[in-house]
Amino acid sequence: MITLKSENEIKRMHEAGKLLASCHKEISKIIEPGITTFEIDNFVEKYLKERGATPEQKGYQGYQYATCASVNDEICHGFPRKTPLKDGDIVTVDMVVNLNGALADSAWTYAVGNISDKTKHLLEVTWNALYKGIEKACAGNRLGDIGYAIQSYAESEGFSVVREFVGHGIGPSIHEEPQVPHFGYPGKGLILKAGMVITIEPMINEGVWHSRMDSNGWTARTADGRLSAQYEHTVAITKDGPLILTEQ
Ligand code: MF3
Ligand code: CO
């Protein structure tokens, strides 16, 4: 079932989203070669707790950490670990913030130290792909319009779009209907309505779109071992167009 959110609910999710955005901004200041994703995870948990919020992912279906931290060829749901990040790595930090029962979900891929021009291009295209999708998140458009905008752009830049993981509705729980694919056909799929709140979170791969699941049952990585990047926003569809809830 797809639920429409009231203006007040959207306002509360926006507060959670602003806090999440400020947390990402702090992470960008501390990321450098030598730091571990375990340290980043602890930083996030403390940062949120000090501001009256909690990391919704911790305990979600048995997940043990405040964040997902996916390094290089890891696509999503990487476990924070005590291995130092290296110069030239990329790491996607994904988190869901619960502020007084309202949720917001946002992921960023960070460059660790100096990354190659090729890797910079991947990050830029992934960022632009997210915003091309958001532009289409308007009442009256269809889900396929979002997916097509992302896929056609990413593929025109020589990259591929992950199929097995998609965006989602979000409200009192992390994953609600509908599923939001980052690929598809214009004019196809569910019609978007004002009051829907969804995540758009394209995972863009340097090589093939196929993934492999790690033996931990959570972490997906690229089948060819090449890089994967992701940016994610929580977006409310309003009568005035898309409203990004996870920006400051
Ligand atoms: N933002 C993540 C997603 O939508 C949250 C995953 S929940 C977790 O996939 F438990 F896997 F962390
Ligand atoms: Co999400």
Image (tube, helix red, strand yellow):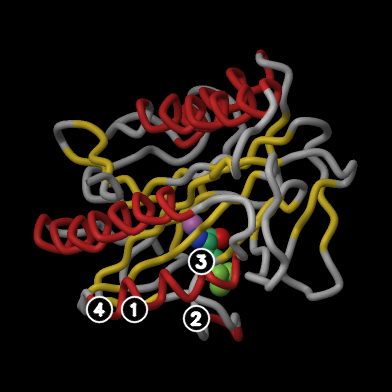
| Residue at horizontal 28 percent and vertical 54 percent from the top | 22
Q: Which residue is mark 2?
A: 58
Residue 198 at what x, y percent from top left?
Answer: 38, 50
Residue 216 at what x, y percent from top left?
Answer: 79, 75
| Residue at horizontal 24 percent and vertical 73 percent from the top | 99
Cα separation between marks 2 and 3: 14 Å
Q: Earlier in the sequence, mark 2 or mark 4?
A: 4
Is residue 219 toward the left or the right of residue 225 in the image? left
Q: Earlier in the sequence, mark 2 or mark 3?
A: 3
| Residue at horizontal 57 percent and vertical 65 percent from the top | 68
Residue furthest to the top in view is: 156
Cα separation between marks 2 and 4: 16 Å
Quadrant in which the N terminus is drawn: bottom left
Residue 215 at what x, y percent from top left?
Answer: 86, 73
Q: Is label 1 in contact with label 2 (beta carbons under 8 Å)?
A: yes
Q: Earlier in the sequence, mark 3 or mark 1?
A: 3
Is residue 243 toward the left or the right of residue 130 in the image? left
Residue 74 at what x, y percent from top left?
Answer: 73, 53
- Compared to residue 186, the image places residue 82 above or below, namely below
Q: Which residue is mark 4?
A: 50
Could you say whether the residue bearing mark 4 is in a helix, strand or loop?
helix
Q: Which residue is mark 1?
A: 54
